[in-house]
Image (cartoon, coloured by chain):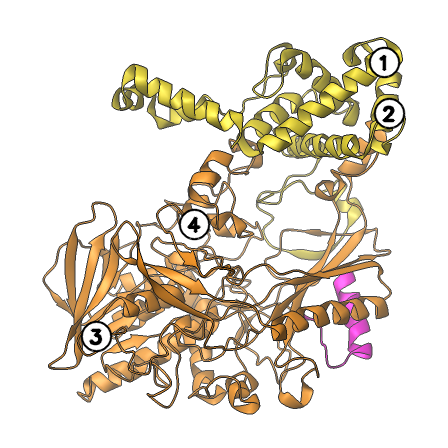
Chain colours: A yellow, B orange
Amino acid sequence: MSSIVTNRRRLLQGLGAVLGTAAASQLLGEQAIKSAFCYTKNVNSYKIDGRVFTKNQMIILHSIVGQIIPTTDSVGATDVDCHGFIDHQLANVHTAVEQKNAVSLVNKMNEMSVKRFQLEFYLCNDQQQLALLTDAEQARNGFNQVDRANLKFIKNLTVFGFCTSEEGALKFLKYLPVPGGYQGSVPYEQIGRAWSSKAYY
Amino acid sequence: MKETKYINESSEVYDVIVIGSGMTGGWAAKEFCEKGFKTLMVERGRVVEHRKDYIAEGKAPWQYENRTKVDNLLVEQQYKIQKQCYAFHDGTKHFFGNDRDLPYTTKDGTEFSWIRANQLGGKSLLWHRQSYRLSDYDFKANKADGVGNDWPIRYKDLAPWYDYVEKFVGISGNYDNLPQLPDSQFLPPFEMNGPEKSFRQKMAGTFPDKPVIISRCAHLTEPQQIHVELGRMKCMARNECQKGCSFGAYFSTQSATLPAAARTGNLYIAPNSVVESLIYDEATNRLKGVRVIDNDNLTQREYYGKLVFLCASTIGSTQILLNSKTNKFKNGLANSSGVLGKYLMDHNYNSRTSADIDGFEDEYYIGRRPAGLYVPNFYYEPSKYHKGFKRGYALSGGAYREDWQSFGHADGFGESFKNKLQHPGKWKIGLQAQGEMLPNPDNQMTLHATKKDKWGIPQIEFNVEWSDNERKMMENSVEVASEMFEKAGFKNIQGYATERPPGIAIHEVGTARMGRDPKDSVLNGYNQAHDIPNLFVTDGASFSSSAVVNPSLTFMALTARAVDYAVKEMKNRRI
């Protein structure tokens, strides 16, 4: 069982111990306790400790997601807090092993950055960051297949976080909650962007 | 639900007790209520009201705590089995059973995935809605190849009842005129997309025995008066189905049978009532009612009725019978044959083949279609069997364009990667096998000798395994689908057979099978217990073979037919 899960249990048990279970429920309500763990967008989340990543790791993760989906004429991953979302999602949905793998990749990116450029990853310029990320993805120049797999995992979470965010789904992709029926053959130019809506993911 | 009457304590003797409120129970209640019988529907779970209790319907992904994924702590504690279902996510989890409260065991070395939906409406809220008739070949299959006992009915016996239920349910589909897959009473079919139409055309010339058709599903593409008067509307192609559909566009207890039953004024519902056993009177050889345990406070109570329709799901119904032991029926009620609990079957969904389709870059679609492609079973009689195995399988799937969900692992960064996410990728196609599982007495469910659930009811122990026949079928399905894709000119063909445990197709059938001979079957050809005249089991437990097609439509037709028979028998005072 993950340490995060254990921590959440401890917190709930702790609240109960301090206030008494009934009192804790009355004061906070189940929903309030739940909302303490609910993901809310905070683009500045990289400036503070996360639940899985430390503050220093969050800064690096912020740079990584920014290189995966940069801000262009449309919003990018950092604009929708993909870094904060990944920290939240890892803590709530993923296993301890997956959490460890994600942290390990972030640390590896920084280690390689210091080794190659004598700079922390987040202080590198775009070119340097992209070179390191590309090497990690290709498992070369000091990166191995494990690093590649870990990077792909973070990349997948970034894409998921971005495309299921309100801005990503509504503005970057095309969202149609009530299509009104099914049409099997429509010219793509009539739609113009990929559908974001799937109902379940 | 207008005029629905919820009850708790009652000493009244109802005309009929219907146990269960899913696909089958809903139909039994509707039919009896419409025929003027005062009907008590006994449901083990909570009340779910149409529209009001569809709490996740219409929520956008960003409005979920974890973007539709379920909290790992919750999964660990309550949904370790249920999470295996493709439809399990944060917007549907409240319609799945809680594994913590619903424990079961499996015999050493075996596995069984038991998906539950214990609330008013049962699995009719969660089902995949694909709806097909069994053919005469299916009803004759056991006799034709000698595996299992002969169904006591033939297609002609059920055909008018398929007609009857289909008009009420609303089945979209195309009139395909195939001997192995009889047409239903259809509403207009869903469309195929561009590559699917092309595939269908190519296959028609190359593999005339493997027609590619649009699947048939219980969605209103063109609502009729019979649907509209219940407040049902056209399918919006949202793919919100398993969250509950306020349009009532797909068939469920809540959208259709319950309001139809309720408007008669004859429907009474006892929710939160876990049936522990049936009350049997040895002197008259009749059931008198049911013993229930309150779902919440565990107190006991009884309900009384002149007739019992057991519609608690294949496994649920048989569990109740096995647990209803009397002096006469020491191994479970209506079990003089000794076959109760045996011949448990599911469908085998353990293969998938996919390929890339070149071209069609200018083609896209609007909406999330609840239907797909379907290739009906082509090994449907012994003369057509593959030499390596008995019976056959259907293929189902469809063509779609890759999108951001496929690109999360693609190489690349920056603007070009971002641009890739914004547009659909190449067309892909996939076909999954839906194989028949042979009836086998060794595949069975029994009551555990010592372990009980929180209601004090013995837990079920499953002992179910795939045989080599099913394994070979899956391997063959990969070869066949690959060959079809190859002839169609598709690229990058990839197929694999897996071995997920039985249960996960959620098409469990058998365990209280129909038959002509009381010595080797539990039910007669009208779903009536051979041993006890006022007991009917009309859900999947009654199946003598699994056939290939999705079974729910047949549950409905069997139930409507059984009610018609039971009413005549009551009038003639034989029950």
Q: Nearer the viewer, residue B84 or A162?
A: B84
* Chain of the residue under label 4: B
Q: Nearer the viewer, residue A182 or A68?
A: A68
For mark 2, what is the residue? A142
Q: Which residues are the magenta region?
A: B194-213
Q: Position of residue A32 (x, y in %)?
A: 39, 23
* Amino acid bearing label 3: Leu
- Whether label 1 touches label 2, CB < 8 Å: yes
For mark 3, what is the residue? B307
* Chain of the residue under label 1: A
| Relative to B484, residue A133 above or below | above
> In the image, which is nearer the foreground, mark 3 or mark 1?
1
* Amino acid bearing label 4: Phe
For mark 4, what is the residue? B96
Q: Nearer the viewer, residue A119 or B393?
A: A119
Left or right of B493 in this view: B569: left
Q: Is residue B490 magenta?
A: no
- Whether label 3 touches label 4, CB < 8 Å: no
Left or right of A8 in this view: A197: right
Q: Secondary structure at mark 2?
A: loop
The residues tagged by marks 4 and 2 sit, at their Cα atoms, a distance apart of: 47 Å
